[in-house]
Image (tube, rainbow, N blue to C red):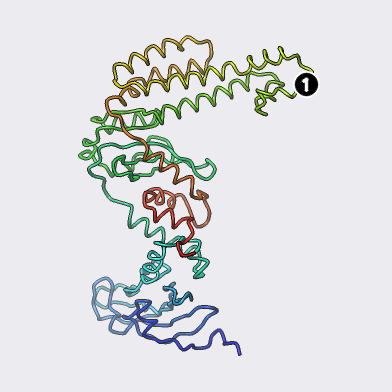
Amino acid sequence: MPKNPEESVDVQPRLLVVSQGVESLNYIGVKRVGEGFEMDCEVKAEAAVCPSCGSKDVSVKENVRRVFRGAPLNRSQVEVVCQIPIVKCHSCRKTREVDIDFADKKKKYTKAFYSYFIKALDSTSITVFNKVFGVPLDICYLAFTDYLHQEYVSNKISNVKEIIIDDILINNGDIGFTIVMDLETKRVLSVGQGHAPDALDEFWALLGPREAKKIKAVALDPNASYVSSVASNLRNASIIFDRFHVEKLMDQRAGLEKKYIFSSSSADQKYLIEADEFATMEYNAFMDPQDRLDLLREITEPLTLAFILHEDLARIWRRQTRETATNFLTSWIEKFIDYDNPIVKQMTECIDKYSEEILNWFDNKVNVKPLQDFYKKVAEIDLTIDKYRDIDYYKLVFLGLHDPKIIRAIDQPPLWW
């Protein structure tokens, strides 16, 4: 016959007490609830002391029933139900809930569950842990967030010599973050929300003026707000626009060029641009071949010029010294600065404005591969905001993304699956 869901079960009390880390409590009993266990316990009388002053001269006003998620037992869920007394102290006149040692009163899980869960993440993911043990996702993500905060959030930053600053978008581009990474250790040092100068305020506070003097090079996105913030806080550092960020800037300008062409084109030309049919021109089979070619040239010439600028500028990174790079950049700017195209002219003026920062790379050839590896890892994980994962959660994930355990915990299958 099926068991009554509230019927007492034959489970060794000592096994439950030890596995859940509640040796300091009085064990009352255990019953089966669904596919798991519910263990009842209470705080011992001698443990009912004032949490404020430690006095034993207290009187119990009432008991509060608290339910904590315990460590799974043979793949069965365990809930620890504890009666926690609220005492009135006759010494300090305060009324408080007594302290407990098996769990944080602000958490929904025991310390035993936390240890079990974090150990399981060495070989599995949060999703699989939820499916195997039936632990609700909100409990899993709360414990995982606590782990990230404990392991990767630091109160200070020290001995950093080279950093890179860049931005990243999540939630389909709706939310942006500013990332600061140590190029030597490949760790993310700080994550600020947005792309404004105040996104770096937390990093400057953690760094402090003494450690700021130790930073010798900063590679960053050619963002005016970043440049001004770095220049005012890192006076001894060399500001560098590396190849990764310069090419990223040129790609953005090429995209603006395509938008400019689209806005200034006729209806038929807009159709071609939207459909990406520059090469086939099949939208009008009766058009003369020479007319098709002329129209194709008319539409694509400005865009082709923008990409020529991009490819031509890339030759600067083949130069070995700052002097040769300076000569090349000067001739490149003179070649394209007078073109009668607003986007091309804007691209050239932008490179001219930041030429000093670009040339600084030849004095300190920083390697930005750690940032590229970081973006590859970000591309592998789900970056959707939902009821379990908020903005603060992703800040913590970015701080720990150098650790393979974090990537595996987020979305990788277990090793034994």
Q: Residue at x 37, y 56 (%)?
A: 148
What is the quadrant of residue 325 in the picture? top left
**Quarter of the rendering occupied by the N terminus:** bottom right
- Callout 1: helix, strand or loop? loop
Q: Front-most of 327 and 169? A: 327
The residue most toward the left is 210
Q: Is residue 86 above or below residue 132?
A: below
What is the quadrant of residue 182 in the picture? top left
Residue density around tag 1, few if under 14, some if 14–19, many if 20 or more, within 10 Å: few
Q: Residue at x 48, y 15 (%)?
A: 345
Residue type (three-letter) at the residue carrying disc 1: Ala
Q: Front-most of 25 and 408? A: 408
x%, y% of residue 166? Answer: 40, 36
Q: Horizontal placement of 143 versus 94: left or right?
A: right
x%, y% of residue 326? Answer: 33, 16
x%, y% of residue 7? Answer: 53, 88
Q: Residue at x 35, y 29 (%)?
A: 227
Q: Horizontal placement of 99 versus 73: left or right?
A: left
Q: Front-most of 355 and 119? A: 119
Q: Residue at x 24, y 75 (%)?
A: 54
x%, y% of residue 254? Answer: 52, 24
Q: Is residue 384 above or below residue 337?
A: below
The residue most toward the right is 286
Q: Front-most of 51 and 265? A: 265
Q: How many marks?
A: 1
Q: Is residue 378 above or below residue 388?
A: above
The residue pinned by badge 1 equals 285
Q: Is residue 204 above or below residue 8?
A: above
